[in-house]
Amino acid sequence: MAERGAANAVFSGEGLLFLTDEQLRRGIEAMFFAYRGFTADPDKILQDYAYGRAHHRAIHFINRSPGTTVNNLLTILGVTKQSLNRVLRTLVQDGLVESRVGTHDKRERHLYLTEEGIALERELSDAQRARMRAAFRAAGPEAVAGFRTVLEAMMDPELRRQFRAGPGGET
Amino acid sequence: MAERGAANAVFSGEGLLFLTDEQLRRGIEAMFFAYRGFTADPDKILQDYAYGRAHHRAIHFINRSPGTTVNNLLTILGVTKQSLNRVLRTLVQDGLVESRVGTHDKRERHLYLTEEGIALERELSDAQRARMRAAFRAAGPEAVAGFRTVLEAMMDPELRRQFRAGPGGET
DNA sequence: TTGGAAAGTCAACAAGGCTGACATAAACTG
DNA sequence: CAGTTTATGTCAGCCTTGTTGACTTTCCAA
């Protein structure tokens, strides 16, 4: 296919970046292949525990924000409560997650990782961080900054807000 | 290029980038949230056709490499042939994909998009490219270069090879 | 020419999304 | 206080998409 000209070009101090359909297709495939690598290591570990990605996500965000409520988790994960509940139930039953009734508001359940939960979280995130660290080192600091900038720009506005707010910000 | 500082730091001309666990966690979450945005638009369109992400992936890679075989697709998609076959069957039945018996090797099926398949591919990729284009424009050319560098570094080596080879290269 | 390998298909099962309906307890509101 | 809303949990059932196992057809090499 022919490259499109001015309509899809962005000028920078260093040169011209053509946002041709072909360039964008490369970006799309890069996301697809990279995400596979991104999840590969945790997925392998999870098999040994008979858990899936859904469990990993729950464990990750409970670890990030100990004491977070079910509702907070629902917002961040973007799944239905039935879906999350199924996962949460097995994690509580297996003793990886503790669910405490709220003190302020007794309707809420505050979620914490147990010692065992923390151990699995560490095993999973060690693997994932190792790959991320290797990629960041190989790519260099400026590439990492660009990586983050583009990823942020790709998020839905509401998710971007959540992301920027960080662990403390999910009221 | 970067020098190593302390165990988790990388030095660059512009400053110190600490690869602390916290920084890496931010990178991990950025991938998670960005992938959600990345798939959001096509997912919405696919609902109208009662298709899923698996159909999108098949359509994408058949469009990228017309005449590719089922086996080629399997390698790229990283699923079992049974899983792919189910998706392919519905696409063929619905008249979006044509499957031609190989001339050279009659065991092989060569896959092509029909006119209708091309139309859906365009609708899906237009949506996905629009978001990618907006993100690339907002982030700027240097960020885009960094984005690609990090994503490549995150891929499994075999997938990275596939990615770099591009449409012509999946022998 | 025959046995194994490769490509593809069909069947059945599991994980993890989804919706809808409903229950309970706590908090809030008029 | 009565009625409503909110937070959570649960049951039932459906769909997509991953898996393994068994099978057919085709190709190729000993």
Image: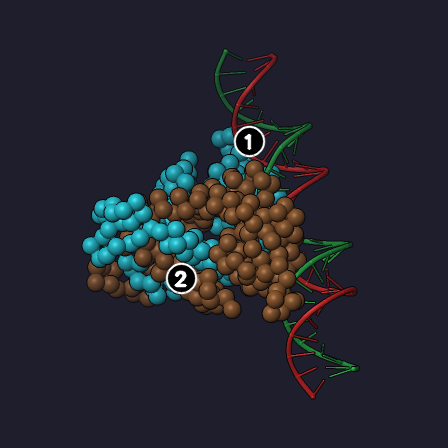
Chain colours: A brown, B cyan, C red, D green
Q: Are marks 2 and 1 in contact (CB under 8 Å)?
A: no
Chain bearing tag 1 is B
Give the percent coordinates (x, y) of residue B4.
25, 45
Between residue B48 and residue D25, name the one nearer to us: B48
Q: CA distance from mark 2 to mark 1?
A: 46 Å
Chain bearing tag 2 is A
Q: Is residue B110 above or below residue D5?
A: above
- At numbered mark 2, what does the secondary structure look like: helix, strand or loop? helix
Give the percent coordinates (x, y) of residue B57.
51, 49
Which residue bears the numbered disc 1? B107
Amino acid carrying mark 2 in the image:
Glu
Which residue is drawn at the image coordinates 53% and 34% (left, top)?
Answer: B108
Which residue bears the numbered disc 2? A152
Classify 10 Å Cα crowding around label 2: few (below 14), some (14-19), many (20 and above). many
Q: Nearer the viewer, mark 2 or mark 1?
A: 2
Amino acid carrying mark 1 in the image:
Arg
- Residue B55 makes an appearance in the image: no
Q: Is residue B160 above or below residue A145?
A: above
Residue B16, image quadrant = bottom left
Give the percent coordinates (x, y) of residue A154.
42, 61
